[in-house]
Image (cartoon, grey):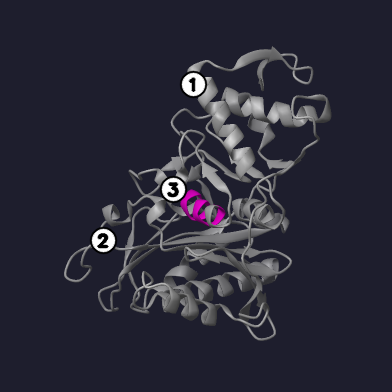
Amino acid sequence: MLCGRTNVNKFLIEEQRRNPTLVGDFSMLVSDVVRSCKAIAQGVSRGALAGVLGDEGSKNVQGEAQKKLDVLANQAFIHHCEWGGHLAAMASEEMDDIYPIPPENPRGKYLLLFDPLDGSSNIDVNLSVGSIFSVLLCPGNTSGRAISAADFLQPGSRQVAAGYALYGPSTMLVLTVGSGVYGFTLDRDIGEFLLTHPNLSISPETREFAINASNERFWEAPVQRYVAECLAGKTGVRGQDFNMRWVASMVAEVHRILMRGGVFMYPRDSKDMSKPGRLRLMYEANPMAMIVGQAGGLASTGSERILDVQPTNLHQRVPVILGSRDEVERIERYHREHATGEDQPFRSPLFSTRTLFRDD
């Protein structure tokens, strides 16, 4: 394949020929997803000119205020993906329950999950947002029976494909079908996503991390320990300076990690004890964990691999720590040491009002 000349449809057909697990009309399904992302990119790029900024005046199933573009992006996925005969059902972060393919349309073997517009709080200030999607095979025979939410409750390790679209200065599509990670850039002159970033990989080492530092007082001790060590820089136990980033869009954070390494953390905290994590397992954590893993990184809750988590409901939330392998392994080790009482407290010169932990 020639970088910059292979469009996403040709890439998908070639991958399906090489991989017998990508059965049936898989490439056509992903092509429908790609069309959804193109339509959303158009709406995002026009912004106020299209009258799509601001709140919709409704809330999603998580009780979060929906932006106008949240609703339009959700409708774009349904409109482009429900009719092709490739899907048995869809599920979205913006919908309470699953969306079975209407009976007047043919039904396929796959299930599609998506976050139609990740980082939508950034829309009104013209910062990067994105769409995230995940493809599963529907278990059993899909004909003659009702598809239920239970069909979707598969661990992330069973994903057939995962990807995201980033609506930034250029629109990019990042995709994995289980054989590496590939990035495509939308050429607006011809309306095609062209391969520009083949075989993306994440450096195992990094000196950059992303976390919402305003929640520091709610973090668990292992995360406090890790961040304090990074902030201590050359004067601390790590012996090197780190940079901290935060965009408030998971797509933008993961994309930066794919491009230059790093760690993204939205860890478990005590801010709302009813929520063991902030990010949705099915629509955000699983697809991003597959992408990061295929690029040589790691994705963890702090205590287990994200792709091994068994879902219990469509809108389940989990803690997320993902990115460069060496740093994620370190954070996992800090969680293990804390669980067994092996860590040792010390008083940080940066944060003299609280107890942190040092690396022995």
Nearer the observer, disc 1 or disc 2? Answer: 1
Dot 1 lies on which element?
helix
Q: Quick one: label 3 or label 1, which is nearer the N terminus?
A: 3
Residue 248 part of the magenta segment: no
Q: Amino acid at mark 2?
A: Pro
In the visual, does 132 lie left or right of 225?
left
Percent across and percent down for residue 148 are 26, 57
Q: Residue at x 78, y 21 (%)?
A: 350
**Tag on residue 339?**
1
Q: Which comes sooner in the sequence, label 3 or label 2? A: 2
Q: How far is the residue under mark 1 from the one under mark 2?
A: 37 Å
Q: Could you tell me if the residues under marks 1 and 2 are in contact, i.e. CB atoms within 8 Å?
A: no
Relative placement, left or right, of 36 versus 98 is right
Residue 48's x, y, as percent? 69, 66
Classify mark 1: residues with Cα within 10 Å, few (<14), some (14-19) or many (20+). few
Relative to 122, say whether 196 is above or below: below
Mark 2 lies on residue:
139
Q: Which mark is residue 307?
A: 3
Classed neighbour count for the residue bearing mark 3: other residues with Cα under 10 Å, few (<14), some (14–19), many (≥20): many
The extreme bottom residue here reads 190
Q: Amino acid at mark 1?
A: Ala
Residue 207: percent from left, percent from top: 74, 41
Q: Relative to residue 233, is residue 137 drawn left or right? A: left
Cα distance in 3D space between marks 3 and 2: 18 Å
Please give the range of residues in magenta: 285-292
Task: Say above or below: 263 vs 345.
Answer: below
Residue closest to the eye, 228 or 327: 327
